[in-house]
Image (tube, rainbow, N blue to C red):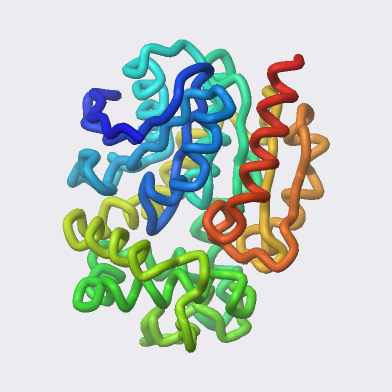
Amino acid sequence: MQHRTLNANGIRIHAVEAGSGPLVLFVHGFPESWYSWRHQLPVLAEAGYHAVAIDVRGYGRSSAPVAVDAYRMTQHVADNLGVVEALGHTEAVVVGHDWGAPIAWNSALLRPDVFRAVAGLSVPYTPRGLVRPSAAFRAMGGAEEFYIEYFQQPGRAEAEIEPDVAGWLEGFYYSASGSAPPMLPGTGSMATIAAGGRMRDRFARPEEAPTWLSAEDLAFYTAEFERSGFSGGLNRYRNVDRDFEDFAAFSGRPITVPALFIGGSKDGPTLWGAKAIERFPQTLPLLHRSVILDGCGHWTQQERPAEVDAALLDFLAALDRR
């Protein structure tokens, strides 16, 4: 795997690539990096694709603009377009996980001429609706504070995380995994935070490290965030209402390119996105498959790499037959 620094959309984007052929662009979520796709890159390269995973703006070795509104969805889509161009391609299949999934979905929504197909992991496609996201998240929290609300105030979550990056990441990763109870609001999970509390107060703690996250894996992520900090990643959450305004013209709009969804039966966003999955026949009319991995938590491509690899290769082969 080769590391590259690309000039995309006027900023620096760090990319890791393997193989040659049609471009498959991987976009990670929070709190991760290109490294979350470490299992997929060599497999797709071996299958004849140019597999590229980026550090999203604000993460790793990519630029981290200071302004909160520099992380609105339209900027992330523009970054993806810039990466495709910088790599010398005119089109790509875009694959995203967690926040990377909405970035991938919206890349295909806005530029289907460039993003010829899309796969989303964990977070199902939900077209822009009529309810402002901040209001919807307040309702989801009930008597407590939904975690996306908790992330809204600049500096608040950062102050919790920074004193012990490794310990916070380990707790966050484990608590959203298939080894912990599902991350659902109102169940005592970290999906909601008690008044005056901290997210880490709701972490489940493993007796032993999960098999999908080695000590070396945790050390890699820790080093990345100790260098970059967390504000860039958290600023994505702080733009949900700006995105609502930016996408007003796309309210209810389906995605018109071939699509794949992969979720976990114990993954919070997949579970609370059940109604969005039910609407896939309308919102993703060219859906190839919707795959729910039994017992899988939030870290889909890391917890169940072989099954994710197989689903992606099946999807890509179907595209090649079209």
Q: In the displayed image of the protein, which residue is found farthest to the front? A: 46
Q: Nearer the viewer, residue 275 or 3?
A: 3
Q: Quadrant of residue 279?
A: top right
Residue in the picture at 51% in, 17% down: 21
Q: Is residue 314 above or below residue 203?
A: above
**In this orientation, which residue lies closer to the viewer: 312 or 269?**
312
Nearer-the-camera pick, 321 or 85: 321
Residue at 52% from the left image edge and 81% from the top image edge: 144
Q: Quadrant of the C terminus?
A: top right
- For the image, the number of numbered tags is 0
Q: Is residue 205 left or right of residue 313?
A: left
* Up-down relation of residue 287 to residue 92 (above or below): below
Residue at horizontal 34 percent and vertical 57 percent from the top: 234
Task: Report the quarter where the N terminus lies.
Answer: top left
Residue 237 coordinates in the image, percent (x, y): 41, 54
- Whole-percent x, y for residue 29 in the image: 44, 51
Q: Is residue 263 above or below residue 188?
A: above
282 left or right of 97 in image: right
Q: Position of residue 310 (x, y in %)?
A: 68, 42
The location of residue 273, given as percent across then percent down, is 68, 56
Q: Nearer the viewer, residue 139 or 219?
A: 219
Res. 230 image quadrant: bottom left
Q: Residue at x 43, y 13 (%)?
A: 89
